[in-house]
């Protein structure tokens, strides 16, 4: 009889995640109940938020329990259906986590003609929606303004800068390394990209943003966030989207440039994409429109096989990914 393979949380990391924090298990293949589908997962999304779910610290969503399957979004194929609207062979977006098979009643049918299936985990998925709502609703850039985004070659950042350009803004990225920066300017069409590992970021920002910064879309927190605060314009906006530089730190880095928030009347707002779940259809329509016109580019980093998912997550948290991090399961 066919078995299911799954990755469970074995222990909670203290500091950096290690492969020992996970355990691979075999389990019987689940059977779909009434209203459910049995899905074979084809792609698993790896995302920075998973580091938070490995911890039991209080957050906006409960963490994974020890021994529980690691949380994650998946794209898969329906093998058996007891769901009124889905049939065998349908491709679906689900939340089945780090396993090869799963059953669920909550699956969204995907249109494979619109885009390759993996895109529904990246540019047309949760990261794309994060970029869309964070920029539009919190950043509120106007044509001619300067938008800066960190982790610019990644899943969220790459979409933020391209949307800023489509809206008539100057888009400036921040990324780690020459190769990523070249991709951001040459392939994604940003006006500039600053390598924070090589340059004095403050000087590089002043050079790339001669009129100052109107919107900063922060994906990383820490020192980069602090440096940006000092370069923000009067009545500028900061979208606090992610703090990846802190996710493995035992203590959060303090901020020195708070004075700028007061003096420049900066509007800082945190965002969680789930707050816009009632409007995901709007974002999908807009993003897939640009995608169909070839105006939204993307890049993926793939590891093969469920057993390599822990390694893929560790690489993502260290910035070794180059584009949306995925696990190819089948
Ligand atoms: N609020 C929400 O609803 C929401 C939703 C999705 C994602 N997010 C957040 O958005 C951020 C980006 O997520 P993503 O999925 O698009 O990941 P990603 O950008 O594809 O990958 C993460 C990137 O973070 C950068 N990074 C890692 N450590 C860093 C450090 N110490 N300092 C500066 N940069 C570092 C690396 O890029 P470099 O090599 O360029 O440094 C790495 O490639 C994350 O913080 C994530 O938690 C938030």
Image (cartoon, rainbow, N blue to C red):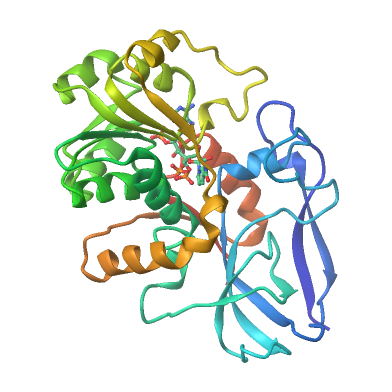
Residue closer to the observer: 84 or 279: 279
* Vertical order, 68 against 251 (above or below): below
Residue 206 figure quarter: top left
Query: Is 247 on the left-hand or right-hand side of 264?
Result: right
Query: Is 15 on the left-hand or right-hand side of 32?
Result: left
Residue 33 figure quarter: bottom right
The residue lying at 41 percent from left, 44 percent from top is 134
Q: Position of residue 117 (x, y in %)?
A: 46, 72
Q: Is residue 72 in sight in this rendering?
A: yes
Q: Position of residue 264 (x, y in %)?
A: 32, 16
Residue closer to the observer: 252 or 232: 232
Residue closer to the observer: 149 or 151: 149
The N terminus sits in image quarter: bottom right
Residue closer to the observer: 329 or 83: 83
* Vertical order, 211 against 29 (above or below): above
Query: Is 294 on the left-hand or right-hand side of 329?
Result: left
Query: Is 39 on the left-hand or right-hand side of 10?
Result: left
Q: Position of residue 215 (x, y in %)?
A: 30, 32
The residue lying at 23 percent from left, 49 percent from top is 188
* Vertical order, 43 against 240 (above or below): below
**Number of numbered labels in the structure image:** 0
Q: Position of residue 106 (x, y in %)?
A: 67, 73
The residue lying at 70 percent from left, 89 percent from top is 81
The residue lying at 39 percent from left, 48 percent from top is 131
* Vertical order, 189 against 246 (above or below): below
The C terminus sits in image quarter: bottom right
Q: Is residue 154 in sight in this rendering?
A: no
């Amino acid at each position: 009889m066919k078995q299911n393979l799954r990755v469970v949380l074995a222990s909670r990391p203290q500091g950096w995640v290690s492969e020992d924090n996970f355990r691979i298990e075999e389990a019987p293949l689940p059977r779909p109940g009434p209203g459910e589908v049995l899905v074979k997962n084809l792609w698993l999304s790896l995302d920075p938020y998973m580091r938070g779910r490995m911890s039991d610290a209080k957050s906006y969503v409960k963490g994974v329990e020890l021994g529980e399957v690691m949380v994650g979004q998946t794209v898969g194929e329906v093998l058996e259906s007891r769901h009124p609207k889905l049939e065998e062979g349908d491709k679906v977006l689900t939340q089945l986590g780090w396993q090869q098979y799963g059953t669920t009643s909550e699956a969204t049918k995907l249109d494979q003609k619109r885009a390759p299936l993996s895109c529904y985990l990246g540019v047309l998925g949760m990261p794309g929606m994060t970029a869309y709502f964070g920029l539009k609703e919190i950043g509120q850039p106007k044509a001619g303004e300067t938008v800066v985004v960190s982790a610019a070659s990644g899943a969220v950042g790459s979409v933020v800068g391209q949307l800023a350009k489509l809206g008539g803004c100057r888009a400036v990225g921040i990324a780690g390394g020459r190769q990523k920066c070249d991709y951001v300017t040459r392939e994604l069409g940003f006006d500039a990209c600053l390598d924070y590992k090589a340059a004095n970021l403050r000087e590089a920002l002043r050079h790339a943003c001669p009129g100052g910064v109107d919107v900063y879309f922060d994906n990383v927190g820490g020192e980069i966030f602090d440096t940006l605060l000092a370069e923000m314009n009067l009545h500028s906006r900061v979208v606090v989207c992610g703090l990846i530089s802190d996710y493995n730190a035992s203590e959060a880095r303090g901020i020195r440039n708070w004075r700028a928030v007061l003096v420049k009347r900066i509007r800082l707002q945190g965002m969680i994409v789930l707050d816009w779940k009632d409007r995901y259809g709007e974002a999908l329509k807009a993003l897939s429109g640009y995608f169909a016109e070839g105006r939204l580019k993307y890049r993926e980093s793939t590891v093969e096989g469920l057993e390599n998912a822990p390694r893929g997550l560790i690489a993502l948290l260290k910035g070794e990914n180059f584009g949306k991090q995925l696990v190819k399961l089948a």
